[in-house]
Image (spheres, rainbow, N blue to C red):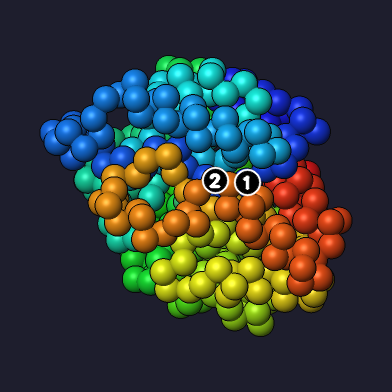
Amino acid sequence: MSTVETVRGPVDPADLGRTYMHEHIFVLSADVQQNYPDEWGDEAARVDDAVAKLSALAASGVRTIVDPTVIGLGRYIPRIQQVAERVPDLHIVVATGCYTYYDVPFFFHYRTPEVRTLLGKEEAEAMVPLFVGDITEGIAHTGVRAGMLKCAIDEPGLTPGVERVMRAVARAHLATGTPITVHTHPGSHQGLTVQRVMGEEGVDPSAVVLGHSGDTTDADHLSALAEAGFWLGMDRFGINLATTFEARADIVVELCRRGYAGRMVLAHDAACYLDWIDPDAVAFLPQWHYLHIEADVLPYLRDHGVTEEQITTMLVDNPRRILSGA
Ligand SMILES: [Zn+2]
């Protein structure tokens, strides 16, 4: 791949700059919002709010974010385009895929490979041509092409639905070369499940980011995945409920010490607005915003022996390598 697809069009990988590999803009429960829109409120105000927050992010030196908001998270590209046009200093890479910890969405439930084979469809798995089309043709007639693939596996493990999505994402990757990010649950070692399934599909680990790896402090487990060639997404800085700021930062320090700065990427998994959490509850996560890494995490890493070169590797070089398929 010679260019990286963003909302405003293809970008030279050399121009990506500092990149946060996992930041949402809006996470919405689409059919709930269609029926109970009062909390979301004024559309223009929500877009203005996102423009303000992302402008502040760009002003902090970040040039690119990957927004892994896919089916199941309320992806709506026309709204992202409105935001992107007003934040010209920030590249936004959008994603395709499907987010579930359990079943496939009902849209796909009866569109089984068996039914599609009976119907004579060329591709048995219904998700594959949709994901590939998002990458090669663009999303929903917007002309915006996805630059990342996304699936999820959480504590319930490899349910039939999760496996179907993961294999579909793998096949869309093999057809296009587009890199993959996987929401994982490292506490239950789901990275090993990803390793097995992606391996069976023939996906090279160097195309896969194991998201939310920073949720654990198990340095040996993460080292083994890094040794296997996966990228580790230390991408939930600020979500300090089951863990702490220090624990999240210390595991990055430890993996840098072990020589794995070349396998990690950083982000917050933040959003301008997500309807999963009562707005009043967001106040309990005061560090969960786009500026936390720059304000708090990087100073801590520097104080604990992480070099400027390692920081540049994690924030600039690794994302460029992942997104360009290099
Ligand atoms: Zn996320």
Residue 171 screen position, x and y as percent: 53, 47
Whether tag 2 and tag 1 are in contact, CB under 8 A, the answer is yes
Residue at left offset 42%, top offset 24%: 48
Left-right relation of 157 to 315: left
Q: Which residue is mark 1?
A: 20
Point out which mark residue 72 bears. none
Q: Nearer the viewer, residue 254 or 285?
A: 285
Q: Callout 1, which amino acid?
A: Tyr
Q: Quadrant of residue 33?
A: top left
**Residue 180 in sight:** no
Residue matched to label 2: 290
Viewer-side residue, 6 vs 115: 6
- Residue at left 66%, top 50%? 294
Ligand 1 within 8 Å of disc 2? The answer is: no
User: Is residue 222 shown above or below 210?
Assistant: below
**Front of the two marks 2 and 1:** 2
Type of the residue with mark 2: Tyr
Element at label 1: strand
